[in-house]
Amino acid sequence: LKLKICLVSAHLFVAMAFRHVSLLLALLAACCWLPAFIGSSKLGAPRPQLRSQAASGSSGSSGSTEAGTLKNPDFFWGNGFEEEDLEEAARKLSENTGSELWDRATFPPEDRPSYMSKDAEWTPLPKERRWMGLKEFMEASALANSNVSTALFLVLSQGSGYLEKAKVDAALESWRSDSGGLNQAGWSVSMFWAKAQIAFGYAWLYGMSSFCGYFFFFRPPLVIYLGIDLLPGIPPWWTV
């Protein structure tokens, strides 16, 4: 009997403690989530200004903004550059090969990995296996320092922030046309996958973070204190 009383008391104590802990976790999650949401909304505010700047000038007016300021959402919605300028830059770049771009690029020296002993033999990666960043791409492509060149970098990198030589070779080959123009079929495929990768990244980040935030932090206090459950078919994980 004493053991049963102790077990029931312990169960009640854990249940009461969890009620308060779950509410505290929900408040902490809200405090962490709201600043990120407000910050992301502020980042999206200058987009109309970027579009107005691009539309008010000539075809080279998009170069008035410093390269590297074009963010992935701006590229996705086409803000800050003209599509015609981007296609012309892609046509000029397709006249090169990936090997030529990598030969013209100047990469920073590699540092010896800290986990290797001083006596161990270490060979830096060959140049063609190095990943190319935006700075090296600007140098190798000889394009103007503009949002157009940054957007072209995002097309080739699929929004990842770096270039791999094999993928660049495949993309440039698909952009070439026998007539000397831009192969619209290959260009459209590259644009589609670049925007699809960016959209998937944002959808995964905000979709999964919202679901996990509700499932682990907001669902327990809502069910316990208000009786609201947006997933009624799923057993409460804190009672399993």
Image (cartoon, rainbow, N blue to C red):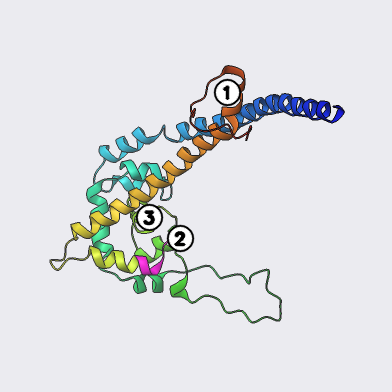
For the point 54% across and 37% down, the residue is: 212
- Residue at the spot of label 3: 158
Q: Dividing the picture into quarters, in which one does residue 204 lie?
A: top left
Tag 2: Cα neighbours inside 10 Å, few (<14), some, or many (≥20)? some
Q: Which mark is residue 87?
A: none
The amino acid type of the residue labelled 2 equals Gly
The amino acid type of the residue labelled 1 equals Val
Give yes or no for residue 163 being in the magenta stretch. yes
Considering every residue shown, the one lying at the far top of the view is 226
Considering every residue shown, the one lying at the far front of the view is 1
Q: Position of residue 17 (x, y in %)?
A: 74, 26
* Magenta span: 162-167
Number of numbered discs on residues: 3
The amino acid type of the residue labelled 3 equals Gln
Q: Position of residue 154 (x, y in %)?
A: 37, 53
- Residue at the spot of label 2: 133
Considering every residue shown, the one lying at the far left of the view is 179
Q: Which mark is residue 223?
A: 1
The label nearer to you, 2 versus 3, is 3
